[in-house]
Image (spheres, helix red, strand yellow):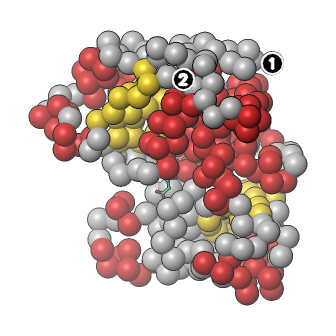
């Protein structure tokens, strides 16, 4: 069993071994338990987190910030990344994180370009955590998704998991499907052909002996899954607004569909949702997406503590 992630960057989920992922999940469970008794722990006093967000975010930034506050640390941030930071003046990401490394002990960055987290890490002298690099990866979301699946289903092993929506542009599903490969799932990718999972990711998964099915039939997939992970059509990634309009209503999950196909289904979504899950789904026992968002805090507490060499 891995015992620390001290000094490590978290850029892509593939950068963590199964053991290291299990360490994060085990720590997250301890943080969740501890936070029921005490809202603030004194684990990282005097340590500073810098959040550098060059793309919109609510959950990721606020859950990292609240995680740091609950660990007894402090937070500095560039409020509107792109507009108010010196990167807007033409500074490279590597220079920006090099400078921020002298103010902060750990950095979380979100940026619209694939590879931007790696670029930031190349300049930084403190751990850099990828809070989303364009259509690339979102590894901390994958960790909180694993944590949620384990909590909701009691195991990660051998589950039948459907991923639906914009699998082409969705960084959450890129990271999550790779993360799940350690537990030998049966994955069913549901999307219109134009938004299919990139072939390189499907091939990578098949090489790891993951069963991968691809379909555009949501109801059929729901009948055969334990967990359905729903994603938003990623409007901001479309060059052609007409193409977005054509695809935006592709899949809409409502209560009647869940009750007709599989009332036992665990339903997840990284949020924000637009119209892909109707509000009447929210009160179903299997609707896990708001619990999933809450789990982001424990998981991010675990990640911050571990990369700073601490744990519970
Ligand atoms: C996701 C993201 O930013 O990739 N949101 C999140 O981090 N919870 C999903 C999305 O924006 O659709």
The residue that mark 1 highlights is 1
Quadrant in the picture for the N terminus: top right
Q: Residue sitting at 78 percent across and 66 percent down?
A: 286
In this rendering, is residue 78 above or below 198? above
Give coordinates of residue 287: x percent, y percent.
Answer: 72, 67
Give coordinates of residue 262: x percent, y percent.
Answer: 83, 76
The residue positioned farthest toward the front in the image shown: 38
Q: Residue sitting at 35 percent across and 51 percent down?
A: 56
Of the image marks 1 and 2, the number of the one nearer the N terminus: 1
Q: Which circle marks residue 72 in the picture?
A: 2
Give the secondary structure at mark 2.
Answer: loop
Q: Which sits in the foreground, 110 or 48?
A: 48
Dividing the picture into quadrants, the one containing residue 190 is: bottom right
| Side of 233 relative to 78 (left or right) | right
Whether residue 272 is visible here, answered yes or no, is yes
- Marks 1 and 2 close (CB-CB < 8 Å): no
Dividing the picture into quadrants, the one containing residue 281 is: bottom right
Give coordinates of residue 60: x percent, y percent.
Answer: 49, 45
Quadrant in the picture for the C terminus: top right
């Amino acid at each position: 069993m891995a015992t620390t992630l001290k000094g490590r960057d978290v850029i892509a989920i593939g950068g963590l071994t199964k053991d290291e992922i299990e360490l994060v999940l085990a720590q997250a469970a301890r943080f969740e338990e501890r936070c029921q008794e005490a809202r603030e722990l004194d684990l990282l006093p005097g340590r500073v987190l810098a959040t550098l967000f060059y793309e919109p975010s609510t959950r990721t930034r606020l859950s990292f910030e609240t995680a740091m506050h609950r660990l007894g640390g402090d937070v500095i941030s560039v409020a509107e990344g792109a507009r108010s930071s010196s990167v807007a003046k033409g500074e490279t990401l590597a220079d920006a994180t090099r400078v921020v490394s002298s103010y902060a002990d750990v950095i979380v960055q979100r940026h619209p370009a694939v590879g931007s987290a790696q670029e930031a890490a190349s300049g930084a002298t403190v751990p850099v955590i990828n809070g989303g690099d364009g259509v690339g990866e979102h590894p901390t979301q994958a960790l909180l998704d694993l944590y949620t699946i384990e909590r909701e289903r009691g195991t990660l092993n051998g589950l039948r998991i459907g991923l639906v929506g914009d699998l082409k542009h969705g960084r959450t599903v890129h990271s999550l499907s790779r993360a799940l490969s350690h537990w030998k799932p049966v994955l069913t990718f549901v999307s219109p052909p134009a938004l299919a999972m990139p072939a390189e990711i499907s091939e990578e998964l098949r090489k790891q002996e993951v069963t991968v099915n691809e379909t555009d039939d949501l109801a059929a997939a729901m009948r055969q899954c334990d967990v359905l992970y729903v994603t938003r059509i990623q409007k901001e990634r479309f060059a052609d607004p007409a193409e977005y309009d054509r695809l935006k209503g592709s899949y809409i999950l409502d209560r009647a569909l869940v009750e007709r196909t599989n009332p036992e289904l665990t339903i997840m979504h990284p949020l924000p949702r637009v119209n892909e899950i109707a509000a009447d789904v929210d009160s179903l026992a299997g609707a896990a997406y708001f619990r999933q968002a809450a789990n982001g805090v424990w998981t991010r507490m675990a990640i911050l503590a571990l990369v700073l060499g601490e744990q519970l």
